[in-house]
Amino acid sequence: MKNRRGKLINKANPPLTIPAIDFIMEELKKGESALTEDHVQPKVKIHERINKASIQIKNIFQDIRKEGKIQLENVEVIKAEVAPFIAQAAKNPDVYYLFEELQANNEYTYKHNIGVGIIATYLGMKLGLSKENLSALTLGATLHDVGKTRIPDCILEKPGKLTAAEYEEMKRHAIYGYELLKNIPGIPPSIALIALQHHEREDGKGYPHGLMGNDIHHHSKIVAIADVFHAMSSNRVYHQAMPFYKVIEQMNSDKFGKFNPEILLEFVNRLMSTLVGKEVTLTNGRNGTIIMINPYDPLKVLLKTSSGIMDLRMEKEWQIERFIG
């Protein structure tokens, strides 16, 4: 079907009417006016707690590196002190702010574990995991990279490209993590499997065993998405952080290959939905405010601009360049 100008209109996703858009904007204004200092204060606490939790993980990982094994008391500290914070942080309604705070600019190895823990827990909540499964997911995600305690610092912190031999050793962190976790009494088997499988991919092109589809544990699939999202969003010794929109764009393009499409689509849609009301700059230089997300193509949003409403589904050559606020 075509409009007056001859442009095709998608009948399944028709453009919004002006009354509908006005209603959305009024709801956004209500939400903005409802913000109080009570909503701002937790942000400061979250920043402090992320740093504190990262230091706790750093100390625990350093102990593991020295002793060559995980003491049960280390796991208990994570359960009692780190995991409750991660669960609390994952409930933060301002997810965009939270994920910005999680971007690691230093001490990547340790902040990464906290970041992945929070992102995976957030996603597990949205997927409706039971309390028991969610607790296991949080612990497994926080310990997913524990195998790196057996990787030499000269490889972990190397600023340049790894040699083939170094890369093969780096990949072994998944096996090392499984070996460290598999015999700890009182923790679910999924914890060790997350460490082992978080680099496996749906198409069988991951490591260490090239598993596919249903051979990969459900929790490992969740952590794989959280792991890649946080890694791409953070500065590392050999890689600069990618812009947020680029991370989402790249991950969205991988939903029918590397990652479980249902889990990834849930994550991207949930994340993009939190951006309603935020201002963006487009690749053509124009600014606009996001007023609606397309669930089938999350980056093709509906925008309110100075000259009217813009539907990026109808403007194929333009896309989001960056987020302003």
Image: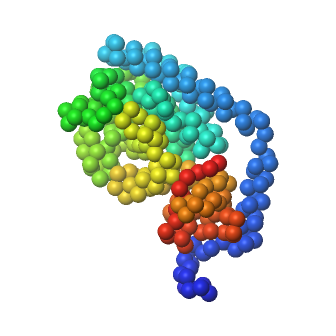
Residue at (75%, 57%) from the top-left corner?
Answer: 27
Q: Is residue 284 above or below residue 73?
A: below
**Is residue 147 visible to us here?**
no
Nearer to the camera, 57 or 123: 57
User: In the picture, residue 229 is in which quadrant?
Assistant: top left
Q: Where does the image place residue 124, in percent across and percent down from the top left? A: 51, 42
Q: Where does the image place residue 312, in percent across and percent down from the top left? A: 56, 67
Q: Is residue 14 left or right of residue 199?
A: right
Q: Is residue 294 above or below residue 246?
A: below
Q: Is residue 235 left or right of residue 277?
A: left
Nearer to the camera, 109 or 91: 109
Residue at (60%, 75%) from the top-left corner?
Answer: 14
**Is residue 251 visible to us here?**
yes
Q: Is residue 84 above or below residue 93?
A: above
Residue at (52%, 44%) from the top-left corner?
Answer: 123
Residue at (20%, 36%) from the top-left corner?
Answer: 164
